Image (tube, helix red, strand yellow):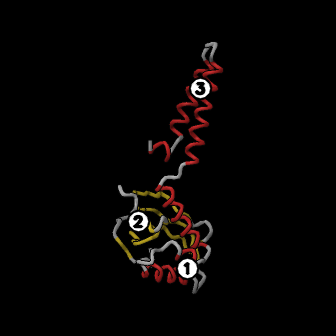
Amino acid sequence: MQWLTENPWPLMLILGGAALVSFISLSQRRLTISGSLLLTAALVYAVEQMIVTTGERVEQDVQAMLDGFKQYNLAAIESHISAEAPQLMTSAKQGLDLVDLAPSFHMKDVEISVDEAGTTATVRLRANGSVSLRPSGTMAHVATYWETTWKLESDTWKLRTAKRLNPVTGEEISYFAAQ
């Protein structure tokens, strides 16, 4: 059932295709069958929109944190960092002081795995876009690769660890390494 809540499109396309085949057929009940199949496809879509999986919740928090960086909003960033990871708060402040992220800076290739207990999530993602170095105003395009660990704390997902990885080799590198 998880595949349905993550991606309803295959089932919706199957139902839509079956509705089309039913409509094209010469059956006397083709409108009833086609309508029922299309209604079922719409119902699948509506149900999928109402369900928010754990992975989707974590991804929303990761995106909210990225938005905090783009808006230079340290309070928003810190609200997503665990109190048990003060070094991450320090690194976030250093990052904000070093660069401005362009509005087009974005996440892609987001992979989220949640443990069986549903309390720890590992997120691997690429974050790419233009940045402006604060001291000089120099613009550059950067491609970064991250592995982060999030913990569920009082019904809120909080960042516990973050590793910046080399996009080619996957080896850990410094947060502020030039690439």
Quarter of the image where one finds residue 40: top right
Disc 2, SS: loop
Q: Residue at x 42, y 67 (%)?
A: 151
* Closer to the camera in the image, 57 or 63: 57
User: Which label lies toward us, 2 or 3?
Assistant: 3
**Which residue matches tag 1?**
99
Q: Is residue 101 visible?
A: yes
Quarter of the image where one finds residue 68: bottom right
The CA distance from mark 2 to mark 3 is 44 Å
Nearer-N-terminus badge (1/2): 1
Image spot of residue 14 (x, y percent): 52, 31
Nearer-N-terminus badge (1/3): 3
**Which residue matches tag 2?**
167
Disc 3, SS: helix
Image spot of residue 147 (x, y percent): 40, 66
Give the quadrant of the N terminus. top left
The CA distance from mark 1 to mark 2 is 20 Å
Q: Residue at x 39, y 69 (%)?
A: 165
Q: Please tell me how crowded label 1 is: few (under 14), some (14-19), or many (20+) other residues with Cα within 10 Å.
A: many
- When the figure is inspected, residue 102 is found, relative to residue 96, above or below; the finding is above
Q: Which mark is residue 19?
A: 3
Left-right relation of 118 to 27 = left
- Marks 1/2 in contact by CB < 8 Å: the verdict is no
Nearer-N-terminus badge (2/3): 3
Question: What residue type is disc 2 on?
Answer: Pro
Q: Which mark is residue 142?
A: none
Disc 1, SS: strand
